[in-house]
Image: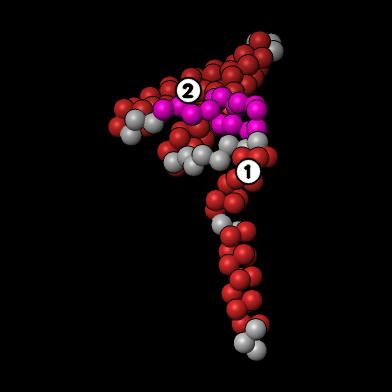
């Protein structure tokens, strides 16, 4: 019994070292991953930029849809009105999104001084 008890503590210490943050960090560095800890703000800034990009794509699709609808109206006033409403509402939505982007940019870059940090996955950089 007295021989087994000290061995138990030796193996427990080995398990603690195996799963420590330093060992996991070194393993990640050897595998080629970026192991620097980012704060939450640059991650939020990247997510916000991605969302704004997707909203821009949606705006572009709506403008094209409204234009095609208008061109294919064939003199139907109801379809022309529908196309005009789509284009008008898309433009208003774009204005709101640009204004929201300006406010977000001001808050993140001026107030919190967040620099744009590209996302890194191995050797490939994903920039927004």
Q: Which mark is residue 94?
A: 2
Task: Based on the picture, tell me whether residue 120 belongs to the magenta stretch.
Answer: yes
Query: On screen, 46 above or below 21?
Result: above
User: Which quadrant holds the C terminus?
Assistant: top right
At 60% from the left and 50% from the top, the residue drawn is 24
Q: Residue furthest left?
A: 111
Camera-side residue: 116 or 85? Answer: 116
At 62% from the left and 59% from the top, the residue drawn is 18
Quarter of the figure with residue 119: top right
Camera-side residue: 14 or 67? Answer: 14
Q: CA distance from mark 1 to mark 2?
A: 42 Å
Give the residues in magenta: 115-128
- Tell me if mark 2 has few (under 14), some (14-19) or many (20+) residues whose alpha carbon lies within 10 angstroms of its own: some
Camera-side residue: 34 or 44? Answer: 34
Task: Based on the picture, tell me whether residue 102 belongs to the magenta stretch.
Answer: no
Q: Are marks 1 and 2 in contact (CB under 8 Å)?
A: no
* First along the sequence among labels 1 and 2: 1
Query: On screen, 72 above or below 114?
Result: above
Q: Secondary structure at mark 1?
A: helix
Q: Is residue 26 left or right of residue 105?
A: right
User: Which quadrant holds the N terminus?
Assistant: bottom right
Mark 1 or 2: in front is: 1
């Amino acid at each position: 019994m007295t021989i087994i008890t000290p061995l138990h503590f030796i193996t427990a210490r080995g398990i603690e070292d195996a799963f420590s943050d330093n060992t996991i960090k070194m393993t990640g560095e050897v595998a080629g991953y970026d192991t620097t800890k980012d704060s939450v703000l640059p991650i939020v800034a990247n997510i916000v930029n991605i969302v704004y990009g997707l909203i821009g794509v949606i705006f572009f699709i709506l403008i094209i849809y409204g234009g095609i609808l208008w061109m294919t109206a064939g003199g139907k006033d109801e379809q022309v009105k529908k196309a005009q409403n789509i284009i008008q509402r898309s433009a208003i939505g774009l204005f709101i999104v640009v204004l929201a982007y300006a406010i977000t940019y001001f808050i993140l870059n001026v107030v919190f001084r967040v620099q744009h940090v590209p996302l890194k996955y191995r050797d490939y950089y994903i920039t927004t």
